[in-house]
Image: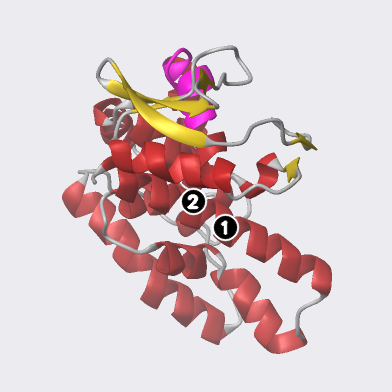
């Protein structure tokens, strides 16, 4: 659902459908882009998706419906293609943002150590995944046992939570931050700030242009949507 289209329905609502909740438009089930019924595993998530459809005006703009898009991703991609999604996420594990540090200036080096290292310590202690850091721009190998531990963490995530992890990791360039967000170790705002630490430092030095501001706003929205999905899965 990437393009806008004219609103064709009067009412959106959620209805029980087996163990899940279906999204209905004028009592007709909504389909995902892949042709599957659009459903949610919790009533809270279903109602939030319904609200997105209700809030549309004369045009339905999918870009303003992040939970609907995440639900479609869970149903069309993550569930059926779990092995592929896990492999994509493990690519982030191999090049996690938090592992690539600046050699200078000293204030950025200190900030990265102060704010990023606790996240790596959390991964080592909680997930049994000690990752190594570098100041080179070249990719470095991570300990196989740490990568295996991160993959086990992904294997434990059911498809809807894995969808949130995938979306957050893509927005942040960090599997560790995505897993910390999923575990409730950090908030969406904190995750965004940590993932944008280098960019924030640059902005403090040189200012921010409109294009960069728009990009950062879009990334924050993606992280917030992933966090909202996690919240609604627990409600």
Percent across and percent down for residue 43 are: 30, 37
Badge 1 density bin: few <14, some 14–19, many ≥20, Cα 10 Å:
some
The residue range painted magenta reads 70-82
Asked if residue 115 can be seen in this view, the reply is yes
In the picture of the structure, the residue carrying the numbered disc 2 is 225
Instruction: Check if mark 2's residue and mark 1's residue have beta carbons within 8 Å.
Output: yes
Which image quadrant: the N terminus?
top right
Q: Is residue 142 visible?
A: no
Q: Nearer the viewer, residue 79 or 20?
A: 20
Point 55% across, 49% down: residue: 173
Where is residue 98? Give x, y as percent.
46, 58
- Whole-percent x and y of residue 93? 44, 40
> Would you call the spot at circle 2 few (<14 residues within 10 Å), some (14-19), or many (20 or more)?
many
The residues tagged by marks 2 and 1 sit, at their Cα atoms, a distance apart of: 6 Å
**Judging from the image, what secondary structure is the residue with disc 1 in?**
helix
Q: Which residue is more in the foreground, 201 or 178?
A: 178
**Percent position of residue 38, x then y:** 49, 23
What residue sits 53% from the left and 86% below the top? Answer: 107
Front one among 67 and 214: 67
Question: Residue under circle 1?
Answer: 221
**Residue drawn at the location 48% of the way across and 24% of the way down:** 85
**Mark 2 secondary-structure assignment:** helix
């Amino acid at each position: 659902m990437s393009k806008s289209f004219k609103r064709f329905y009067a009412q959106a609502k959620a209805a029980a459908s087996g163990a899940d909740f279906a999204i209905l438009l004028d009592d007709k089930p909504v389909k995902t882009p892949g042709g599957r019924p659009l459903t949610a595993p919790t009533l809270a998530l279903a109602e939030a998706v319904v609200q997105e459809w209700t809030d549309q005006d004369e045009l339905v703009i999918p870009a303003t419906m992040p939970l609907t898009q995440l639900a479609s991703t869970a149903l069309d991609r993550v569930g059926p293609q779990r092995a592929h999604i896990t492999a994509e996420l493990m690519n982030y594990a191999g090049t996690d943002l938090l592992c690539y540090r600046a050699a200078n200036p000293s204030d950025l080096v200190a900030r990265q150590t102060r704010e990023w290292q606790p996240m790596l310590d959390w991964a080592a202690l909680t997930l049994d995944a000690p990752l190594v850091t570098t100041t080179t721009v070249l990719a470095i190998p991570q300990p196989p046992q740490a990568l295996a531990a991160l993959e086990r963490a992904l294997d434990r995530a059911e498809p809807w939570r894995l969808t949130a992890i995938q979306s957050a990791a893509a927005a942040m360039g960090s599997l560790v931050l995505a897993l910390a967000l999923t575990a409730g170790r950090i908030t969406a705002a904190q995750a965004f700030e940590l993932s944008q630490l280098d960019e924030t430092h640059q902005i403090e030095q040189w200012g921010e242009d409109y294009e960069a501001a728009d990009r950062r706003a879009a990334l924050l929205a993606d992280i917030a949507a992933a966090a909202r999905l996690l919240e609604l899965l627990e409600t």
